[in-house]
Amino acid sequence: MSAALALPAQAALEQAPALLQQIDAALAAASAEGLRIDASALSAFDTSTVALLLHAQRIARERGVPLQ
């Protein structure tokens, strides 16, 4: 089963540093089965959140970790 990381209801520039740490830690701990980022609770976000998701995609690709 892949690991999961749930995004909060609000993710904006103010939360970006903490979210970056969470994403990097989740990717570092992810097994070959991958990482699933759950954005179902996300109701308010800005471009920094999009940048974080693109960062996650880039790092996952580099490490060969499947990302959903």
Image: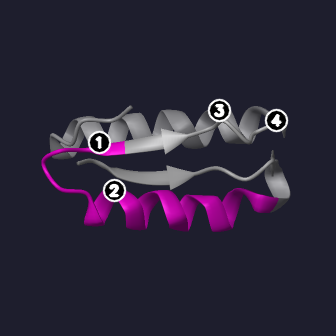
Gap between marks 2 and 4 measured at Cα: 22 Å
Report the residue marked by disc 3.
50
Which structural element holds mark 2?
helix
Label 2 crowd (10 A; few <14 / some 14-19 / many >=20): many
Work out whether mark 2 precedes mark 4 in sequence or the reverse, and give the earlier one: 2
Gap between marks 4 and 1 measured at Cα: 22 Å
Work out whether mark 4 precedes mark 1 in sequence or the reverse, and give the earlier one: 4
User: Relative to residue 13, is residue 28 depicted above or below?
Assistant: below
Left or right: 19 as drawn, with respect to 42: left
Task: Check contact, mark 4 vs mark 1: CB within 8 A.
Answer: no
Look at the magenta stretch and give its main secondary structure: helix
Report the residue marked by disc 4.
46
Task: Check contact, mark 1 vs mark 2: CB within 8 A.
Answer: yes
Q: Of discs 2 and 3, which sits in the foreground?
A: 2
Report the residue marked by disc 1.
60
In the foreground, 41 or 28? 41
Report the residue marked by disc 2.
27
The three-letter code of the residue at mark 4 reads: Asp
Q: Quadrant of the C terminus?
A: top left
